[in-house]
Image: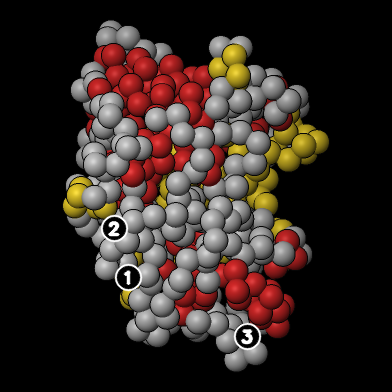
Amino acid sequence: MKTTSLAVALVCSSLCACADRAAQDAPETLATAEQAVVTQCPFLDPADPAFYPGPPVDFAHEILITHVRVVDDPCRTTWTGSCAGGGTQGIWTFGELMRRMAGTGAPEVLVAEWLHQWEINIVVNGFPVPARPGIRPLLIDPWLIASGCAPGGPIVGPGACLLDLKRAPFRLLAISNRVDLACAGYTGPGDGEARFVYGVLDAAGNPTRAAVIFEYKLPPFRGGAPYTAVNWENDWHALSTLPIGAPPYLAILQGILDDVTAVGALPGGPNLGTSIGQVRTNEIDFNGPPWKLREMRLAPGSGIPGGDLLLATTTAETPDDSVNLSPPLDAYLVANAPLLATFTQNPVPNALLGGETSAPLVAPPPWWDHTPVSPLAPIERHHFGFNTCNGCHTLEVATPFLHVGVRAAFTPAPLSPFLSTSTATGGGGLPLSVLSVSDPAGSGAVFRYNEPWRRLCEASRMLTGSPRCWSRANGAH
């Protein structure tokens, strides 16, 4: 490993983490005031024998796609546009993805049962998840009206009026290639993820402070042949050589995503083999601040006609808000303190995981913390908070909650500082820019990131055929 005086490129492998990890190297030495973790990428260093000599990976073309020629493509992202230039009508719409996710079930029922969970109080893993009744006037009633139904009527059970999925009030914000998650110990069997990010629209078609993310596992087969993360990345990489949004570009992207989202894409998966892993929501407008995050998965045997329901589950690696500053969390932190320093801690015990989490936490301190029983170094506290969904979406990375922001039509979605750091090279396999974040707990520690650079590195590593992941969950080699 090369050395440098800069402390750069502390990064995470999910968005941010929300996941358990596996160590790949001996621990790095970490300072307490400022991290001395350096991730230099040989695959992006022309002077290194491991350098990838082919066409460079373009972050905006193949890793996180937000260009309006893609997300506002009149054929694939609407039901009313033209497909004169090729493509399949509406194939990237919210409604079409729900139709595929339902298998032989009724997709309108799948969607209604999913939405209804915000209208009622539920319990997940023993923790209460209160209703968010603002979803009714903001989203459900306008959608009922657009579907020819009466506002205020039921959307589930007897007398329910079916929602018209072609009138679904969601706007595509981004398409994301997460082949790097094959390195994270996060996706389980499979080779990373492909993601669709949508913003929720109000009755007038304006963006609200709410987003939905469909996270699909990349199937281990494509076209009947075994497929790995390396195979998928080679397919995605063709996009970097084409003008973004041009017909050949869109055709290749549609081909990739069609094979990921199609019914039967993951044999043995629920609802005739959907490859959906989870659906996450981040919102404030369903009932006001603070921001709330939820995660939903298809629950086997949950019972819509012919298929499974998309039900709330625990939010990955994120304790319930009530667990902050509690003995159970203290016990976990004490046991994992040596591992937290290198971001290799054991998974958060299931008993601590809640079905909803706030960003930032509603009770002081507004970050994940500990009592004096479990004293942690700043890096240890930060790594724990960074590994939670709400920590990653706010204070731990100086982000105003959404990493992919909501947008008006024909305007690209704004990206958080964490995802918009420049990938320009500074030479020697290092980026020119970093995102510096001061420890929100006030320790004086400084944490440094360049997540786009790390993803470029992993994609370039795959393109060389190198099988071994380069970055750990905290970016250290």
Location of mark 1 (residue): 437
Q: Nearer the viewer, mark 3 or mark 2?
A: 3
Alpha-carbon neighbours of circle 1 within 10 Å: few (<14), some, or many (≥20)? some
Q: Which mark is residue 251?
A: none
Q: Quadrant of the N terminus?
A: bottom left
**How far, Cα to Cα, is label 1 from label 2?**
10 Å
- Label 3 SS: loop
* Residue 79 x, y percent position in the rendering: 39, 20
Q: Quadrant of the C terminus?
A: bottom left
In the displayed structure, 315 sits above or below 142; it is below
In the displayed structure, 295 sits above or below 382; it is above
* Residue 50 x, y percent position in the rendering: 35, 37
Residue depicted at x 46% and y 41%: 180
Residue depicted at x 60% and y 74%: 338
- Label 2 SS: helix
In the displayed structure, 43 sits above or below 24; it is above
**Residue 232 makes an appearance in the image:** yes
Closer to the chain start, of discs 1 and 2, is 2
- Label 1 SS: strand
In the displayed structure, 194 sits above or below 440; it is above
**Residue 449 makes an appearance in the image:** no
* Residue 456 x, y percent position in the rendering: 34, 41
Looking at the picture, which amino acid does disc 1 mark?
Val
Give the quadrant of residue 42. top left
Of 329 and 230, nearer the camera is: 230
Q: Nearer the viewer, mark 1 or mark 2?
A: 1
Of 460 and 375, nearer the camera is: 460
Location of mark 3 (residue): 374
**How far, Cα to Cα, is label 3 from label 1?**
24 Å
Apparent side of residue 89 relative to residue 266 in the rendered image (left or right): left
